[in-house]
Amino acid sequence: MTTLSDLAHATAPELERALDVLSGKRIAVLTGAGVSTDSGIPDYRGKGAPVRTPMTAQEFLASPAARRRYWVGSHLGWRAFAAAEPNAGHRALATLEERRLASGVVTQNVDGLHVRAGSRRVVELHGTMRRVFCTHCGQVFDRRDLAARVEADNPWISVTEEVKLGPDGDVLPESSDGFLVPECSVCGGMLKPDVVFFGEFIPAEKFREAEQLVRTSDALVVAGSSLVVNSGIRLVERARRRRIPVVIVNRGITRADARATVKIDAGTSDVLAAFADRLPSLD
């Protein structure tokens, strides 16, 4: 059981307030990259986060050289990314859902760790690295199968334990010369990971699903997100308009701190585990 001694002394009053606010309520959860840092996946903006220049969707679609550079980095990072395991925070959210205390998880992450931890209702706002699809015919491929194809077509490529993994499961390659970009095995078309690239919009049906989850819940918990991405702040605003409590758990400031009912400046794993341990079951 997670006790107050497991958490920083300064966060203890906020934890108690959050438990009081969430007690007896069915909770929607919004998660960001900070939930996965304890699984070895770096976040975007936290202390020590790597400087990133994300590839835009326009660049990926328009430039063969950009696609080659992307696929080299994506594959080099894939093995380390796929080897990451759910942490205590992921498992706590799955427990809250199993106990019917959480209505589901909306995540900005593409790592699939909520699903692997056992959460059943997961809205992946930005897609998932588990799948790749053809932009021409729509055929969908499992990323594990594609990784095997990439290695067969590029036997010289090396995957080491020293790659500097990014939040989206990619690395910056030293060179992409000679790399054979994978194509659709059905029609020969262009393949693209099933994720929302920088410069792309979240699919409308995905956001509606996330809104529905918030609309049918009694409280919103934001975990591990600075809420810089507009989709997250829009969901917080939906909760605020419904006058339901908003609890934010994040190291450092977020864009919605002033709107939070309770803000806990701490890591997510211990706090979410405390929620799972101490929130009473609903009648």
Image: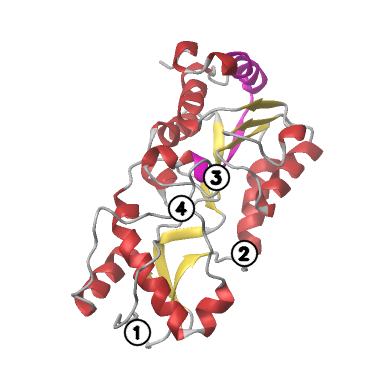
Dot placed on the residue nearer the N-terminal end, 2 or 1: 1
248 vs 162: above or below: above
How far apart are the alpha carbons under marks 2 and 4? Answer: 21 Å
Q: Nearer the viewer, mark 3 or mark 4?
A: 4
Asked whether disc 3 touches disc 2, contact meaning CB atoms under 8 Å apart, the reply is: no
Dot placed on the residue nearer the N-terminal end, 3 or 1: 3
How far apart are the alpha carbons under marks 2 and 1? Answer: 25 Å
Residue 271 position within the rendered picture, expressed as x and y whole percent measured from the top left:
51, 25
Q: Which residue is mark 3?
A: 32
Q: Which residue is mark 4?
A: 167
Residue 108 position within the rendered picture, expressed as x and y whole percent measured from the top left:
55, 51
Dot placed on the residue nearer the N-terminal end, 3 or 4: 3
Residue 259 position within the rendered picture, expressed as x and y whole percent measured from the top left:
76, 34
Magenta run includes residue 23:
yes
How far apart are the alpha carbons under marks 3 and 1? Answer: 35 Å
Name the kind of residue labelled 2 in the image.
Pro
Please state the extent of the stretch shown in magenta in the rendering.
12-34
Asked whether disc 2 touches disc 1, contact meaning CB atoms under 8 Å apart, the reply is: no
Dot placed on the residue nearer the N-terminal end, 4 or 1: 4
Secondary element at tag 2: loop
Asked whether disc 3 touches disc 4, contact meaning CB atoms under 8 Å apart, the reply is: no
Residue 142: in sight, yes or no?
no
Q: Residues within 10 Å of mark 4 (few under 14, many from 20)?
A: many
How far apart are the alpha carbons under marks 3 and 4? Answer: 10 Å
Name the kind of residue labelled 4 in the image.
Pro
Q: Which residue is mark 2?
A: 203
Q: Which residue is mark 1?
A: 186
